[in-house]
Image (spheres, rainbow, N blue to C red):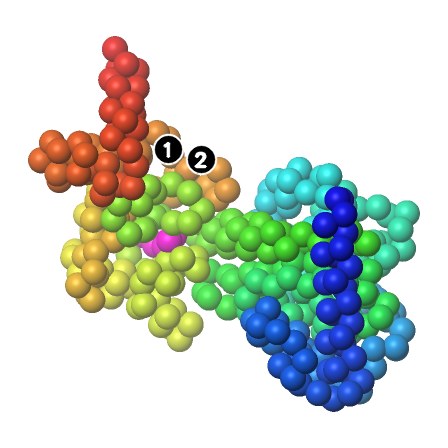
Amino acid sequence: MNVAGTTAAHERLQQIERVRRAVLEEGRALTDVLVHAWYERAWIERSWRRCLQSGQRPQDRVGFDLVSQQHMRRVEEANHTLVAAARPVLEQLGRAIASTRYFAVLTNDEGMVVDAHGPIDLGDPRAQVIARIGADLSERAVGTTAIGAALSELQPVWLHRGEHFFEDTSCYSCAGAPLFGPDGHCVGMLDLTGIDAAERPELKHLVAQSARSIENALALSRPHKLVLRLNWPGRLLGDDDDGIVCLDRDGWVTGSNGAARQLLAGLAQAAHGPVHCSELFAQPWEPLYDLARASEHTPVEVPLWSGLRLACLAQPAGGARAGGARLPLRDVEIALIRKAVNDARGNVMEAARALGISRATVYRKLAQKAAERN
């Protein structure tokens, strides 16, 4: 790290220490002592105050206790699907963070560790205690951490060194994101932790992106006959940003991901009872199954009851996997480009503008497809 970077890191730690004294020792509010950069981090103060109200003190020792064997067996059984869905993502994360001294921890919705992966130095007791299956890393057990914060705030968070509540945990830096199941309820969280490591706030984006991949895998793990991939018209379908809705043979929703629940307000009812796709789309639902059986999987636009429209790619069960190529992505791209050109009545510039790509890219993609056929 250069001199400027070292100075900035030192000033950051000093700033954290000033906040700790103000809130934890002097009883003042975070906003009394800090500048605008901390307003969006008010959740840290909320967590600290919860810890104080529960009788914890920053100087208390942290035991990092394991739950009982009986409780652990129940946790393992209850979280088998979560662990299976997350394992491929954890392996990818292990490669992404291999040189950063960070590793991944997966917990259930109670903050119990159910899996860990990455460059874990098991010779370091500080790594060993938090990477053990069954370790209780909830806020009530280890105070303010990315794990407890993500589960309490239900949003991605970043925590560095002294932003943790206990002095015993001030060696950690961590990013965390909650995980939501196919019914929209929180089922756990994903954490990236480093020990005496350089601050890496960009890991908040990585952990949030990885959490989406796990949520997609959870949605696709539900029994289904049809998968609908959804996004706004003009967006390329086929990656982890798609809304995913899984349907059974009769059109009932068996699962969805967070993106779909943002795109389709009607999915909010899933928490209270079954939702049928006829409640989501203002068109007959049976043709969606015909589209999935077609030899060429081409996105179509589907109308919503709100008057909005979404791009929709219908896929049969088994034709979509989370975290990798679902169907030939090149074919999806070409289908979208052709549709945009047709909608623009052959005006390539207008089609490129609608897709958010260059005219040269439109010509290149179409030429590549033509060359493959020849």
Q: Residues within 10 Å of mark 2 (few under 14, many from 20)?
A: few
Residue 115 sits inside the magenta stretch: no
Decide which of 286, 135 is in the foreground and name it: 135
Q: Decide: marks 2, 1 in contact (CB < 8 A)?
A: yes
Amino acid found under the numbered disc labelled 1: Leu
**Which residue is found at the position 71% from the left and 79% from the top?**
48
Q: Secondary structure at mark 2?
A: loop
Q: Which residues are magenta?
A: 243-249
The numbered dot on residue 325 is 2
Decide if residue 123 is on the left or right side of residue 82. right
**Which residue is found at the position 61% from the left and 74% from the top?**
35
Percent coordinates x, y for residue 249 in the rendering: 31, 52
Give the residue at mark 1: 329
Decide if residue 278 is on the left or right side of residue 133. left
Determine whether 31 is above or below 100 in the image: below
Q: Quadrant of the C terminus?
A: top left
Amino acid found under the numbered disc labelled 2: Ala
Is there any visible trace of residue 17 in the rendered image? yes
Image quadrant in which you'd find residue 45 = bottom right
Decide which of 344, 359 is in the foreground and name it: 359
Is there any visible trace of residue 294 in the rendered image? no
